[in-house]
Amino acid sequence: MLNLIIHGCNGKMGQTIAGLVADDDGVTVAAGVDAFDEGKNPFPVFKNISECTVKGDVIIDFSVASAVDGLLDYCIKEQIPCVLCTTGLSQQQLKKVEEAAGKVAVLKSANMSLGINMLMKLLKEAAMVLEPAGFDIEIVEKHHRLKVDAPSGTALALGDSVNEALGNEYEYVFDRSARREKRPKKEIGFSAVRGGTIVGDHDVIFAGADEVITFSHTAYSKAVFGKGAIQAAKFLKDKPAGLYDMSHVIG
């Protein structure tokens, strides 16, 4: 049995994970951490991770950036692996994540969806075949109207997967409105759509002469990210110190 601590248990993703765990015979929520709690959870909830007295096997974090420093300190002290899902970390915090990974297992990924991470793997293979054949590369992402950043972190991660396979020779372009010239060869264009309640939609387009190949991923609910986080927690249990990502989970 895997005993989880959910850091940020009362947020949308925290509650999603708690609901998924309820249907998983191999996992249980030992405790939650959240600054705001109404006592509705069937597990003990602590306002701060430093106050947590329940021992867990792995921590899944879907909280806020300001809480991550304390979380990493706790994981090092208690030697509890962490699936770090909070985004928007500063450069200083990202450095602290790397330092913490030298002392305890930390898994960090731009997107917890198993499908997205499999797509990243496939994109590397496709890029190495299609780019030499003259295909241009464009990425289009769509999200709900409340999302504040653009392009999405996932879109950038997909671009990074392609670019790494091609020797990091490509430039990222986010706006062509002021440019009057043919499309340069060595660029990846990003387009962002914001509207409605779109959970997450990503297309990676390889456009060649007289043919187009599109790799697409659509998330219909936040459950896909919760399922991926739980799979990551199962993977991370008892792992030695190190910095992991979802590519290690999917193999």
Image (cartoon, grey):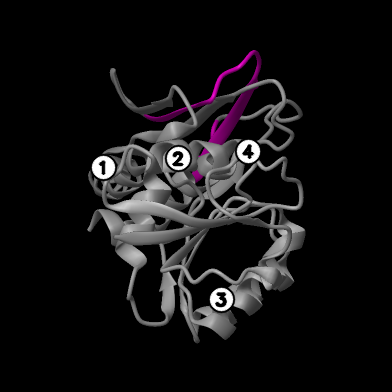
**Element type at marker 4?**
loop
Residue on which disc 4 sits: 40
On screen, residue 12 above or below 216: below
Q: Is residue 72 left or right of residue 219?
A: right
Q: Is residue 185 visible?
A: no
Residue at 39% of width from left, 52% of height from top? 28
Residue on which disc 3 sits: 75
Q: Position of residue 99 (x, y in %)?
A: 58, 82
Q: Is residue 10 left or right of residue 128?
A: right
Alpha carbon distance from label 2 to label 3? 22 Å
Q: Amino acid at mark 2?
A: Phe
- Residue 251 within the segment the image draws in magenta: no
On screen, residue 73 above or below 131: below
**Element type at marker 1?**
helix
Q: Nearer the viewer, residue 168 or 227?
A: 227
Q: Which mark is residue 225?
A: 2
| Dot 4 crowding, Cα within 10 Å, few <14, some 14–19, many 20+ | few
| Dot 3 crowding, Cα within 10 Å, few <14, some 14–19, many 20+ | many
Alpha carbon distance from label 1 to label 2? 25 Å
Q: Amino acid at mark 4?
A: Lys
Badge count: 4
Q: Assess whether mark 1 and mark 4 are in contact (beta carbons under 8 angstroms).
A: no
